[in-house]
Image (cartoon, grey):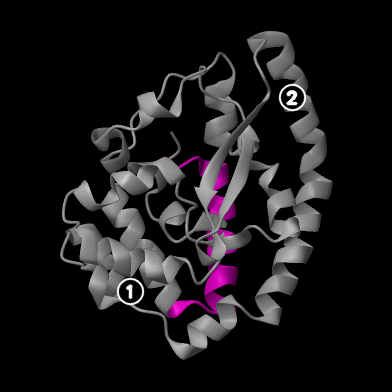
Amino acid sequence: MKQSLINVLRGTSCLDQYDLTASSYAYLNGFSKRVVDIFGAIIGLVTGTPTLLCAILVIKVVDRIPVIFSQKRLGYLGREFTIYKLRTLKLIDDRKLAKLENIQHKPNYETTTTGKFWRVTSIDEIIQFWLVLKGDMSLIGHRPIPIYYLHYLDQIEGMDKIKLDHYLNIIRKYKPGMSSLSSVNGRGDLTMQQKMEYDLIYAQNASFVLDLSLLIRTMIVVITRKGAK
């Protein structure tokens, strides 16, 4: 896997060279991963809810905008689900965000007065522990793709319809995650293609040990705020 990660950073990786293995598929859809998700989500909700409630109060008082942001994302088995976050960006229609350049390279969006802080500390995502407990997401998986991205993904650099179909066929077989391999390897500094390649590398190598490693690395990234935008 180490060489695969290096290839992504060098730009010499290719989406169609990765696939689910029997062992990774069994783990991704198995009992042990679900148990870890449930316990992790409960711990996250218990420890994170006081911070979340404080953030909601601050947003109401300072920003004076609707507190919760919701958006349709691509989920397990290709089903749509609604993801929730604290609202950190100024009110904007998805259609204005749906530009190829914004999808290829994540821009520095215009945040609310308090929004930047919630984003770089990942406090805006605490609410997603509920989605993990509910079963829509996992603690570790692929990053959930906004539905409106799907029209543009085959147009980004290095992509075509065949590669996109291969990618979507694989990520539909496991749940999107609060964190991912790309989240600890560059996060917002990565291109969309690099994030997609990391998703497939994870799918091919998924295991309990890898998830444990990614959970620890995620906590480090959140604390250091590396790659946050």
Q: Amino acid at mark 1?
A: Lys
Q: Main secondary structure of the magenta part?
A: helix
Q: Which sits in the foreground, 211 or 145?
A: 145
Name the image quarter holding residue 169: bottom left
Mark 2: few/some/many CA within 10 Å (<14, 14-19, 20+): some
Residue 227, image x, y percentages: 41, 42
Please report the bounds of the magenta region as a residue range: 205-227
Q: Amino acid at mark 2?
A: Ile
How far apart are the two marked residues, 2 and 1, measured between alpha carbons?
Answer: 40 Å
**Residue 55 painted magenta:** no
Q: Which sits in the foreground, 121 or 190?
A: 190
Q: Which residue is mark 1?
A: 2
Image point (70%, 80%), residue name: 31
Q: Is residue 208 above or below residue 129?
A: below
Name the image quarter holding residue 213: bottom right
**Is residue 102 left or right of 85 when viewed as pictured?**
left
Which one is in front in this view, the residue at disc 2 or the one at disc 1? 2
**Residue 214 painted magenta:** yes
Task: Return the mark for residue 56.
Answer: 2
**Is residue 30 left or right of 43 when viewed as pictured?**
left
Q: How many labels, in total? A: 2
Asked which secondary structure carries label 1, the reply is helix
Residue 112, image x, y percentages: 54, 16
**Is residue 152 left or right of 123 when viewed as pictured?**
left
**Image quadrant occupied by the N terminus:** bottom left
